[in-house]
Image (cartoon, rainbow, N blue to C red):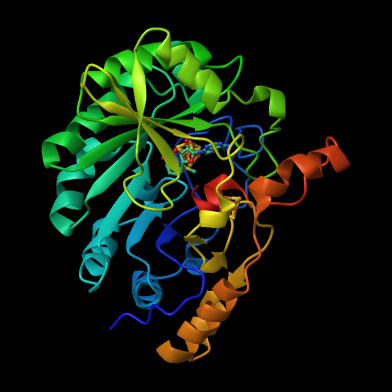
Amino acid sequence: MIRDQMKRPLRDLRLSVTDRCNFRCRYCMPKEIFGPDYPFLPESQLLTYEEMERLARIFVHLGVQKIRITGGEPLLRRDIDQLIRMLHRIEGLKDLAMSTNGVLLPKYAGTLKEAGLNRVSVSLDSLDDERFGRINGRGVRVKSVLSGIEAARRAGLQVKINMVVQKGINEQDILPMTRYFKKTDCVLRFIEYMDVGNVNGWKMDQVVSKNEILNTIERIFPIEPLPPNYPGEVASRFKFKDGSNEIGVISSVTDMFCSSCTRARMSAEGRLFTCLFAGKGTDLRRLLRSGMTDDELLDQVTQIWEHRVDRYSEERQELLNQAPGRNRKKIEMSYIGG
Ligand code: SAM
Ligand code: SF4
Ligand code: SF4
């Protein structure tokens, strides 16, 4: 039975399963910081799949309908299909998705689909090998990701593509990416470069705004707005006037949607965060392991969610004006998963 009595709706859960990654994207895990000595979470600190499933059930009781598995790179966590199988069995869960850099999809897509995964969002920031290799920090070629996308489609997974746009880095890829994915059944989504964490050296003038992205596209491909698929959808949707496909833009820097935010995030070690830009979270692993009952855990999560006051995107400009160049302490994207 769903105990969906929250005053503030809680609909999505992002579940990070690892903070490790085989890429070093400059906007997320710059290689100068995430080097060989970086203190990633030891395996002993990670929630087990049984613990993740137990917490996921509690979140579904509170109204969560969608779970997205993320990381770091989620396909690096051993036997991830087992977790998918366990989550897929949760009654009331309507959608199970994963964010991935795609390179391991040729190996795993079939198993993931068979385990119950519905969708993948694959990150790809350029179709140019040299630029993409520099952005991912590891010289990974575009073809490795395109093969992953193809494997996911063939396995029957729905596929979206996420492209983070950074000024001076890959704006020139907006049109080639649009042209390429317009002809496919994959929806391309542009993401404004965000000031998540502290290590990527984010500056406002590196952001390519939603309006700039749309203007670039519209000059060549006429588009028109589409209504959201559901209340609180973070991407604004646009369809090509020739009816070929649609695109989305996620603009958490220049548009604010805090008032409709329904998303909780859990790190791989079981810390619950009520905002992507939070500095600290609640240690649910400790509560889980202290012998709390499901009802007690449910009450704890309810309290945390009901009392949240997060509205970072709305406060960002004020904070930047108050203390230019000062970046308050925030968790890193690779730890919390986007
Ligand atoms: N490794 C997987 C991947 O890349 O899809 C999952 C984790 S990654 C942290 C999740 C998403 O966050 C990706 O789409 C990535 O492009 C995006 N991302 C990471 N850092 C970002 C930033 N500073 N601004 C905007 N999006 C970012
Ligand atoms: Fe890894 Fe994803 Fe971050 Fe890139 S965006 S470094 S693939 S976690
Ligand atoms: Fe939600 Fe925080 Fe993003 Fe606002 S800034 S939409 S509260 S995650």
Expressed as whole percent of the image width and height from the top left, the position of residue 11 reads: 40, 63
Which quadrant holds residue 256? top right
- The answer to whether one can see residue 128 in this image is no
43 horizontally vs 244: left or right:
right
- Compared to 327, does 274 lie above or below? below
Expressed as whole percent of the image width and height from the top left, the position of residue 268 reads: 48, 61
- Compared to 60, does 239 lie above or below? above
Q: Quadrant of the N terminus?
A: bottom left
- The answer to whether one can see residue 130 in this image is yes
* Residue sitting at x 64%, y 51%: 277
* Residue sitting at x 36%, y 54%: 68
Expressed as whole percent of the image width and height from the top left, the position of residue 326 reads: 83, 41
47 horizontally vs 276: left or right:
left
Q: Nearer the viewer, residue 231 or 150?
A: 231
- Compared to 267, does 19 lie above or below? above
Expressed as whole percent of the image width and height from the top left, the position of residue 286 reads: 56, 80
Q: Nearer the viewer, residue 75 or 330?
A: 330
